[in-house]
Image (cartoon, rainbow, N blue to C red):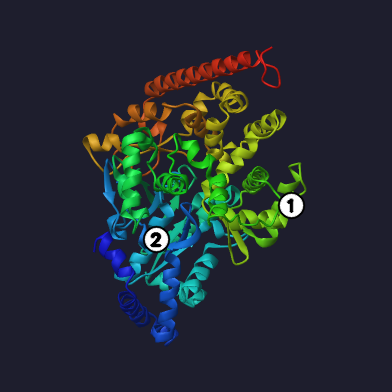
Amino acid sequence: MDVTTTLATLASAPMVTKALELLITDLHQITKDSFGNRVKRWGTERHLDEIRKNLRALRLVKTIWRVDQATDFLKFYYPARVVLGSKRKVVTRLADIYTSRNLIVVGTVGQGKSILFRYLACREFLDSKRLPLFVELRRLRDRGTLESLLLSEAEGLGFDLDQRLLAHLFKNGRLVLFLDGFDEVRLEDRQALITEIESLARRHPEIPVLISTRPNSGIEASALFDVIAVAELEHNEYEDVIRRLYSGDANGAESLISGIRESAPQVVSLLRTPLMVGLLVFRYRVDQSIPENAIAFYSDLFSLLLIRHDRSKAGFKRQRRSAASDARLEDIFNAIAFLTRFDEKGVFTDKEMTRYAKRAVATGGGIQVEPGEALADIEEITCLLLREGDEYRYVHRSVQEFHAASFVCDQPESFVAKFYSTLREHDSWHRWLQELWFLEQLDPYHYSKYFAVPGLTRLLGLVREVLAGIAIMFPKETGAARRSGVAIVFGPLSLETHLAFWLCEGLGATVRTLVAKKAAPTNRLDNKALSINDVLTGSERGALAERVRALITHRLETLERFVEEKESTAKLFDVEGRPV
């Protein structure tokens, strides 16, 4: 069954009902001796209807290009590609990527990891004898366990599992787990979660476990999982994504595609993820403009949503709850984003968000704003903060990260300097990787002066530690494909290594080029993390150390010159920007 057929089948209530009946009948057969007719009751007409409705709810998502209402992903889903060795492969079902080894699916910001997992979970209902459970790991509460999340997800779908029945399904291999967003788990909670996941995987090797994460979150080095990467969009694939997002409006899709081809071909290099294509579609629908760079995709998002809201009816400007201006409202939103990122939270109770709003309002001056009213405007007008029951979350994590970075940019230099020094001195910078990327684009001077230059200076004396933290993974291929598929990973504890790769463009390519010429040790399994000592000889490690030191030095000197030039230029003007 290809993706098109799958999407059509999932949209057909009779087909979904038939698939659920077969699944429930099979699960009843392996549980009836211990649990009687408990599972069989799931197959009653009333219960089936509830499960089918809940399954449809699993397909409903609020996206950054359609923030005002939940949309069935069947209407816009574009088949994900993954990198297997040196090849890209379209994922139509779980069997395309899963054989007998559990998987970590790695992808950068906006590559569609969550949507892929939702799609695969829904697909499993159609042609599997296993109960698929899609779990958002960001919902892991303080002292919560993975088992509690699994039970909660099953209940949300309409399957009333308890610990005994869950354990029985585990024992009989009748579950498949899609654990989404490992990187959204707080750093201090990750090791405990890794331990729980690995314990489960060891006890139930017949249960497929898939975990999605951004790169270098710490889970990739687990010996119980293979690692595959979501592929970027290539060539003109962005055009197919646009057509999917414009489902039902072929003229609109072709108008945007023509605009890119004729007037903005430079933007194509930015359209490497579904998220960036979605941001482009949103912006084009609002004001028919095409962003010129990656930052522009985010920088005007808040104001464009306000404009769309105010222009939703000709001649009528919608009344807001607060007295805040557009700029003040965005400042409050930026402050909320920073405060919530500082606490490493992505899901908030109503009380928690109210406290964040009060603190955010207190950070600014000007006209008095009631926090609850400002929060209501942000929620109702922009929809960048979504309220679901008694919980809040961001429409996309990258929105939180961009606006947290924007908050830093707007602060006095003393705050900015302290922010960067805190990240360096407490080794907490790796918790802010996406914000740092945004800050490098938004404010390269302060980023270089207070973060990159001090960081590189420190790394010059830690080259040995940098190399010690590198782990190499060889793919299950031979020849050129094997060489091109070499991967480099490092965990959150290899902070010097992580920082060096972050600050030194080209370091990854240098290491990969050297180790790709080597054969993996014959006494080691493929797709296992090997240390540099396992792969390179002593002389080769020495040569690599010199090359790494040279790269760090070159990058440091480049940034020092940039900072000096900026400061020299600044001396030509007074505080109000007038020539001295």
Image coords of residue 160 (percent x, y): 49, 78
Q: Quadrant of the C terminus?
A: top right
Above or below residue 501? Residue 77 is below
Residue 566 horizontal side relative to residue 201, left or right: right
Image coords of residue 186 (percent x, y): 58, 50
Q: Which residue is mark 1?
A: 358
Instruction: Answer whether residue 94 is visible to the viewer in this image.
Output: yes
Image coords of residue 270 (percent x, y): 40, 37
The foreground one among 278 and 16 is: 278
Q: Which residue is mark 2?
A: 73
Q: Secondary structure at mark 1?
A: helix
Q: Quadrant of the N terminus?
A: bottom left
Return the residue found at the far left: 479
How packed is label 1: few (under 14 Cα within 10 Å), some, or many (20 or more)?
some
The foreground one among 57 and 292 is: 292
Q: Secondary structure at mark 2?
A: helix
**Marked residue nearer the N-terminal end (1 or 2):** 2
Q: CA distance from mark 1 to mark 2?
A: 35 Å
Return the residue found at the far front: 315
How packed is label 2: few (under 14 Cα within 10 Å), some, or many (20 or more)?
many
Above or below residue 501? Residue 575 is above
Q: Amino acid at mark 2?
A: Phe
Label annotation for residue 172: none
Above or below residue 15? Residue 147 is above
Q: Residue at x 59, y 36 (%)?
A: 429
The foreground one among 556 and 251 is: 251
